[in-house]
Image: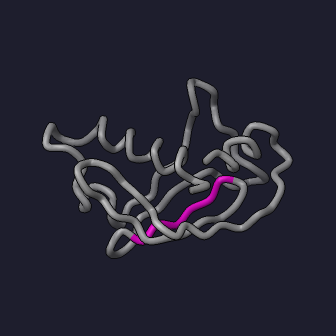
Amino acid sequence: MKKSLFVLAAAITISACSSQTGVKQTDLQHHRFELLSVDGQTVPAAQGRIPEIEFGSNLHVSGQMCNRFMGQGNLENNVLTVKGLASTMMLCPDENLNKWDRLC
């Protein structure tokens, strides 16, 4: 899925900050997270948009890198998956954001 790196980065951040029991749905649900770096490289805001991911009721996932995305999340054994992730398909003027936006 297109936003796997982005979703994974948020999940890793949450995992590192949560208790030893791992990530729980309540750790994510009704929270918004910003992507700050990828492999040590700072992630810039794209045209005033901050790359982010938000978790709503029942782990509905929505967010944006350059493109907006949304889908239904599932958290099992500390692994977040989002099946049927939908996304817009715009080209981003920032080369790195454009590259990260297309990672599978």
Q: How many marks?
A: 0
Which stretch appears magenta? 60-65
Residue at the extreme left: 21
Residue at the extreme top: 40
Residue at the extreme bottom: 57
Give the residue drawn at x 69%, y 55%. 49
The stretch drawn in magenta includes residue 64: yes
Q: Is 68 situated left or right of 72 in this image? A: right
Give the image location of residue 100, x and y in percent.
67, 43
Q: Quadrant of the N terminus?
A: bottom right
Give the image location of residue 73, x and y in percent.
40, 65
Q: Is 84 situated left or right of 89 in this image? A: left
Report the front residue among 103 and 59.
103
Report the front residue among 91 and 85.
85
Name the chief secondary structure element in magenta. strand
Give the image location of residue 69, x and y in percent.
60, 65
Quarter where residue 90 is shown: bottom right
The stretch drawn in magenta includes residue 58: no
Give the image location of residue 26, x and y in percent.
24, 61
In the depicted structure, whether residue 20 falls above or below residue 65: above
How are the colours assigned in the image?
one colour
In the depicted structure, whether residue 65 falls above or below residue 44: below
Give the residue drawn at x 61%, y 51%. 51
In the depicted structure, whether residue 37 falls above or below residue 79: above
Quarter where residue 24 is shown: bottom left
Give the residue drawn at x 70%, y 46%. 45
In the depicted structure, whether residue 60 falls above or below residue 5: below
